[in-house]
Every structure is written in structure tokens, then in C-alpha cells.
Amino acid sequence: MFDGAILGFGGSMLKTMICVCLLWLALLPTDAAAQDRAAIAQDFQVWLAQTIWPKAQASGVDRDTFETAMAGVAINWDLPDLVIPNAPQGGGDTQAEFRPPARYFAPSSVNTATNIGRSLLSSHARTLAQVERNTGVPARILLSIWGRESSYGRAKIPHDAFEILATKGFLSTRADYFTDELIAAFLILDKGFATRRQMRSSWAGALGQPQFMPSNYLTYATDGDGDERADIWGSDADTLASIGAYLQSHGWRAGRDWGFEVTLPRAVSCALEGPDNARAISAWADMGINRVNGKPFPATELREDGFLLLPAGRFGPAFVVTSNFSVLKSYNESDAYALFVGHVGDRMQ
């Protein structure tokens, strides 16, 4: 038993000891994390040698290509969505399309994309007309995607594609997907489609002005300027032709719009939203849904299906969108992305 004085003294000492212990414990995770990272980095090199090189070799990649691609590549610990042993896991997707939309649709962004796009409608008229003839995708949509993906080729692409893809192939929540994309990136380099220096990417591994994943480059990249190369890094014509080829392959229907902003009468239930409730656009018009600009729906659209989209709920903007809206989402699985592309394209006109 302790008397009051001793208890008071003991309490003070106990607090001091606790603080010291907490400080000591606080240092442990950092040291442990450093040790974990060193061990993980060693495992990463083993994985490259024992798993990735055999996969690359089986795909026809030359050993020199592999060595060139992976020279100096290390784990990028700053990427989102990594699965790191003994570390707290990050939360969610960091793409702008999956954040609150106010900044995504900031007037400065919309106006800049629109104004540059309008100037390119003129300066790239011949190329745009050719791509539209070949794919059915309107010039304004081609430009709007180009603007959203890389600011019309003006954006700096910040990352080493091989570092990003290897890190995500080894540690991410979608390891198999990014491993396959890494092999595709080796093939791009091996076949001479790009130089090692050109292989810069977004934090997700997307390449060039249209921001194609490597496998999409191998499938959809198109020569638009007639030099028998598909240069999505330096050629505007190839970039536009490749975007058009991608959308055409994913079902873009020539002659159809992407959608229309509309007014939603109170009598129309918001439960009718979504592709499962698609119906003829004439049926939506019969329910009192009209375009906000006062124009009628195009006669060619009336017998075609469309579905109701309420991205901000009942009291936000409303749209009747077409199958081409879903094609835009194949480029980036986000309603905000497809709406931005469609909206900026409309404003160009």
C-alpha cells in the first residue's frame, strides 16, 4: 500500500515512464517499416527475375529489351491502392472522376478545354474529317477526349511506365491486370513502337496523348498521318485516329448523339433512372421530358432508345443519354468523365 505522498510521486514517475515508452514505441513502426520495405524490395527483384522475365520471354520479348526497360526500376511506394504487408491500406480511387464533381466541372477547366478545342476544329479539320469518315466518331468528341486525357498533348506525363506497372503488378489490388499491362509495355518497346524515353505514364500506367493502357495501344493505336507508325506520343493525327478506332471498336454508333440535357417533370419518378429503364426517346418526350435548350429531340433519335441519368439526384441536372454515352464510359468508367466529354464537345459547336 502507498500513502498519498508516495502515490503522488509514483503517479508522476508513472506518467514519465509511459511517455518514454510511448516515444520508444513510436519509433518502432518506422524502423520496422524500413526493414519491411527492404525485404519487399528484395522480393520485388526476385519476382521480376523469376516471374516477369519468364512471362515476357514467353511473349517474345528480347532479353536486352527486358534489361533496358527494367534498368534502375524500383518500387514506387507513393502510388495509391498498394497492398503493403504490415502497413495501413489506403482508401479508394484517387482519380478526379471519382471525387466530388465540382472541381471536375470547374468553369475554368470547361472553358479552357472548349476554347482550345474550337481552335483545333479548324487547324485539324482535314484529319478530323478523315477520322470521322473512318470511324463515325464526331470531331468534337475526338477533341474532347484528347483534351480531357492530356490537355491536347500539352500535359506533362510524369511517371516511368515500367516503374508504375511493375509496382502495381507486384503490390496493387489488381496485380494480375497490371502484370499483363507490364508485359504489353515490354512488347511496345521490343517492337520499336516507342523508345524507352517515351514510355512515360500516368500513375495508373496510361501512355501518350490519348492515355492508352499498353494493351490498348497494341490493339487500337492507329496510323493517322500515313507514315506507317502509330505514334500516340508525338503525332496529333495518330492520336485522333487512335481515339476514333477505340470508340468505334467499343460500339460507337455513327449519326447518334451522346445525350441531351433535359428538364424532369415532377410527375416523372427518379426511379426510372438507369440503363435498365431505357426506352424510345419519343416515350421520354411523351412523358413531358424536354431539352433544356428548347429544341426538339432530333427526329432521327426519337425511335432510338435512351435512358435517364440523374448524376446529382432528383434536384440536380438531368439527362437522357444514348448508347454512345456508354461507349464514352468504356474509355473511363465514370459518369462524370462521359458528361464532361459530351458537354465540352457540345460547347465546341
Image (spheres, helix red, strand yellow):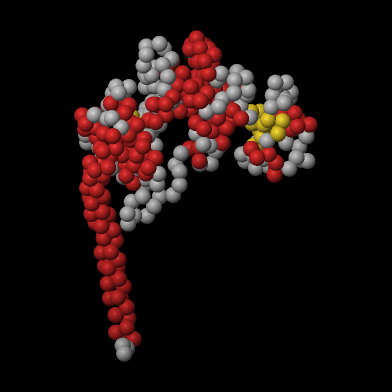
Q: Quadrant of the N terminus?
A: bottom left
* Residue 268 visible: yes
Percent position (x, y) of residue 228? 37, 13
Question: Which residue is found at the position 20% from the left and 29% from the top?
Answer: 64
* Image position of 232 with respect to 320: above or below: above
Viewer-side residue, 35 vs 331: 331
Given residues 255 and 334, the one toward you in this image is 255
Q: Residue at x 75, y 32 (%)?
A: 283
Give the total of numbered labels.
0
Residue 23 shows in the view: no
User: In this view, which residue lies farthest toward the bottom?
Assistant: 1
Where residue 87 appears, as percent x and y from the top left, is 34, 55
Horizontal arrangement in the rendering, residue 119 relative to residue 317 (left or right):
left
Q: In the displayed structure, does residue 79 sit left or right of residue 333?
A: left
Q: Give the residue displayed 59% in from the left and 20% down from the top.
A: 254
**Residue 277: quarter of image:** top right
Q: Quadrant of residue 317?
A: top right
Residue drawn at (50%, 41%) of the image: 98
Whether residue 296 is situated above or below residue 276 in the rendered picture: above
**Residue most toward the front?**
58
Q: For residue 328, what is the image quadrant?
A: top right
- Residue 334, x across and y down, in percent: 53, 37
Horizontal side of residue 206 vs 64, given as left or right: right
The quadrant of the rendering that contains the C terminus is top right
Q: Position of residue 207 (x, y in %)?
A: 38, 29
